[in-house]
Structure formats: C-alpha cells, structure tokens
Image (spheres, rainbow, N blue to C red):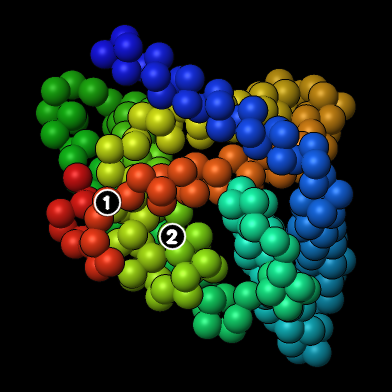
Amino acid sequence: MLNYLKDITFKANDVFLRAIDILMRNYVSIAGLCFLLFITSNLSTYLSSYLSFYSDSYFMGLKVLLLLLFIGLYFSLQLVLLKNAIVLARGEKKPGFWGYVPSFSQFVNYIIGLLFYSLIAFVVYLVMYVLCFPLLFLGISMDTVRSEVHPFLTGVIMLFVLIRTTFYPFFIIEHGFNTFKSYKFSLAMTKGNVFRLLIVIFIVASTHLLQLGAEYFGYTLLSQILGLVNSFVIIPIVSIVMSIVYVDMMKSYKGGADPSLIDNII
C-alpha cells in the first residue's frame, strides 16, 4: 500500500510539473480566458445587485435576459478554456478561433450535465438524511446529526461522485458525445484512478481552502490576495492539470467504445 501511495504521489507530482511547464509557455492565452471568466462573474454579480433596486416588470425582464446572457457567456468561456487546455496537453497544432468555440449541442449537453450533477447532489442529500436517522436512536442529538454528521457524509459521497464524473465535459467538447454517454466514459475512465485523482484534487483545492479559511477568520486582505491567486494562477493550472490527467488516462484506457454504466459505477 505504501509503494502504491508513493507511486500515485510521484505521478501526481509529474502531472503538476508538466502543467506548470505548459502554463509558463502559454500563460497569456490561458490566463486571458480566466480573466474573461473573472470579469464575467464579477460583472454579473454587480449588475444583479444594481438592478435589485428596481422591481418593475421592465427591469425584471431585463434581469432575466442578462441572467441568460451571462450564463451562456460564462459556461461558453469555460468550454473554450477546456478545449484550449486539451489542445495544449496533447501538444497539437492550435485550431483557428472557431475551433475553440463550442457548438450549441455541446453547450446544451454541458448544461444538462451540470443539472444532472445537481440532481445527484439533491438525491444524495435526501438519502443521507434517511441513513442518518438511526443515529438518533443511539443517543446522538438532532443538531449534531443535522450540522455535523449529515454534511460530512454528504460531502464525502459527493466528492466521490465529483471525481468519477468530472471528465464528462472533456468527452462532450472533444468527441461531441451526449451527456449520458460522456458520463459513462467518465465513470469508465476514472475506475481504478480514484486515489490518484483525489490527491490531484486535494492539491489544487488547497489554495481555495486557504482563501475560505482567511475569509472565515476575518483576514480580508489575505482572502482577496488568495482570490486573485486562485483566479490567475490556480484555475489556469487546474485546467491544464485535469487535461493532462484526461489525456494520460485516455492513452491507458482499455474499455470499449460503449462502456457499461452498471459495471463502472463501483
């Protein structure tokens, strides 16, 4: 087990070193997309708070229109960033501008995948409450179950779900698969790679956790600095890291062209 952990840790370190090398050589294009994501997110938040002072029907319709516009722009930029990261990870020749722009079908399948993940989270949330109910008969208080045990168990399960399904957008954007088929390939490809991916996710999430900690303890300036680091360093690295992991796992993938959903869930 110790040798196995050393092996996956070494592979994770290798992935990060390759990602840093790619990022240093292509920082402008990747960070530029992250900057657009940053501006889009903050501009939508600002406009939402500004228009909240107006409640008539005209401004309500305008808010709905702007909401749809920013949702479309934000998630389209995410897919462009993903496509760019995949091209860089494969070392392929860069396509033209339109080669990065997702099709309407790819965008819709990506959004459906996000909604499906939200549905899974809701189902897990309810199921965990049912499974935690017997703890009440063991003398554990309702407040403890509701505020500590249930969130912890739900978080663990959803982390596992996230690891297994995190690559579904890659199959949508690179192969044009629908949502369901992309989820099946993500489950098939990540089977047996959970610990490796867990280490990768823990490393890339560490800075975000530090930002949350600084914000929680009232270190506003430190939290803002870490927020900028996350936006312009960590997020670009994450996109490259996940693309490298995706490319490496695809090279070693030995499954079929239509993997079974049931066989790859566990």
Q: Is residue 63 visible?
A: no
CB under 8 Å between callouts 2 and 1?
Answer: no
* Amino acid under disc 1: Lys
The foreground one among 107 and 241 is: 241
Q: Left or right: where does residue 53 sit relative to residue 17?
A: right
Q: Where is residue 56, by image quadrant?
A: bottom right
Percent x, y of residue 235:
69, 43
SS of the residue under disc 2: helix
Q: Which residue is mark 1?
A: 254
Kind of residue indicated by mark 2: Tyr
Q: Is residue 100 above or below residue 188?
A: below
Q: Residue 19: x, y in percent?
A: 65, 36
Q: Residues within 10 Å of mark 1 (few under 14, many from 20)?
A: few
| Horizontal and vertical percent position of residue 151 | 39, 36
164 vs 12, nearest the viewer: 12
Q: Is residue 117 above or below residue 190?
A: below
Quick check: 130 left or right of 39?
left
CA separation in Å, label 2 and label 1: 18 Å
Report which residue position mark 2 lands on.
Answer: 168
Q: Residue at the location (71% across, 40% down)?
A: 22
Q: Position of residue 241 (x, y in %)?
A: 59, 40
Look at the numbered disc 1 and give the secondary structure of its residue.
loop
Q: Residue at x 28, y 38 (%)?
A: 192
Q: Which numbered disc, 2 or 1, marks the residue that appears first in the sequence?
A: 2
Q: Quadrant of residue 102?
A: bottom right
Question: Which residue is pictured at 59% across the width and 83% down the height?
Answer: 104
Residue, far top: 2
Local packing at callout 2 (Cα closer than 10 Å; few below 14, some 14-19, many 20+) is many
